[in-house]
Amino acid sequence: MEVIKEAADLIGSSNFVVALTGAGISAESGIPTFRGKNGLWRKYRAEDLATPEAFARNPRLVWEWYVWRMKIIGSAEPNPGHIALAKMEEMGILKALITQNVDGLHRRAGSRNVLELHGNIWRVRCVDCGFSKMISKPPEQIPPKCEECGGLLRPDVVWFGEPLPKDVLNRAIYYASRADLMLVIGTSAVVQPAASLPLLTKRNGGILIEINISDTPLTPICDLTIREKAGVILPKILEEIG
Ligand code: APR
């Protein structure tokens, strides 16, 4: 395919490549995306569950959704898309991987410089005292209680209306601004501020390559668009780079 060669040539002639990923990169690992036809859980949209208000109203319901997702994520494996990105970093091509995903699959695939903009599903935090810890399986009793103060534990992820972790966002802004090429992979590019990071790259003269099975609001400003599954195309691009 011509686009594979084109992408490989653009990557090959760049000095500072950064990637931004979304739920689409983990779709081929069997993890449902948030939007689109498989994006619903029961009758709820992500926007109805992933908010502090939803948690305050019904922590049990929100936790049920997270336990459902934790079970899927816990039995999922990184796919060839995750692995190709980890290899690009190992080869010195990819300088940073900015992800909106909370599933931890990039790290499990071997990526090291991973910036998790929206947190990690395997970390919980007390809404009262701030105590936080990593967990390796879904809590047995929901909603789980804080072992320090007895308060409610919540997933330590970023919900709608909440700020992103400052240090992570600042580093993402640094990498996006410095990148002379950004791979934008499997994100619907509608959730801010993540969706604006490619604009920083573009504004500084960088190239945008989008890999997505459908159009997004970013498509019109991308220099190259590849309408293919990430797990199919990324290994081919890697092979072409050599
Ligand atoms: N390969 C490439 N792209 C894919 C694939 C695939 N195999 N499967 C799906 N996609 C694309 C879809 O076309 C869509 O554009 O992935 C994108 C998934 O979009 P969303 O479900 O909106 O996921 P994301 O962009 O990561 O959502 C952002 O919203 O609720 C939140 O916090 C949550 O981080 C998440 C944020």
Image (cartoon, rainbow, N blue to C red):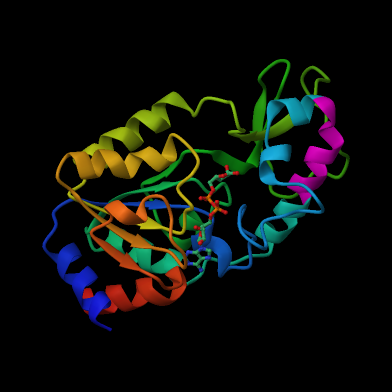
Residue at horizontal 52%, vertical 25%?
163
Q: Residue furthest left?
A: 13
Residue 89 versus residue 201: which sits nearer the camera? 201
The answer to whether 170 appears left or right of 136 in the picture is: left
Magenta segment: does it hold 204? no
Give the overall secondary structure of the magenta segment. helix
Magenta segment: does it hold 63? yes
Q: Position of residue 231 (x, y in %)?
A: 45, 72
Q: Quadrant of the C terminus?
A: bottom left
Q: Does any portion of residue 242 appear in the rendered image?
A: no
For the record, the magenta segment spans 57-67
The answer to whether residue 105 is above or below residue 133 is: below
Q: Residue furthest bottom?
A: 1
Tell me how many marks there are. Answer: 0
Q: Quadrant of residue 84?
A: bottom left
Q: Position of residue 222 (x, y in %)?
A: 28, 56
Residue 6 versus residue 166: which sits nearer the camera? 6
Q: Position of residue 147 (x, y in %)?
A: 79, 25
The answer to whether residue 186 is above or below residue 229 is: above
Q: Does any portion of residue 169 appear in the rendered image?
A: yes
Residue at horizontal 16%, vertical 40%?
204
Q: Residue furthest front?
A: 220
Residue at horizontal 13%, vertical 53%?
15
Residue at horizontal 35%, vertical 29%?
170
Q: Quadrant of residue 159?
A: top right
Residue 147 versus residue 123: which sits nearer the camera? 123
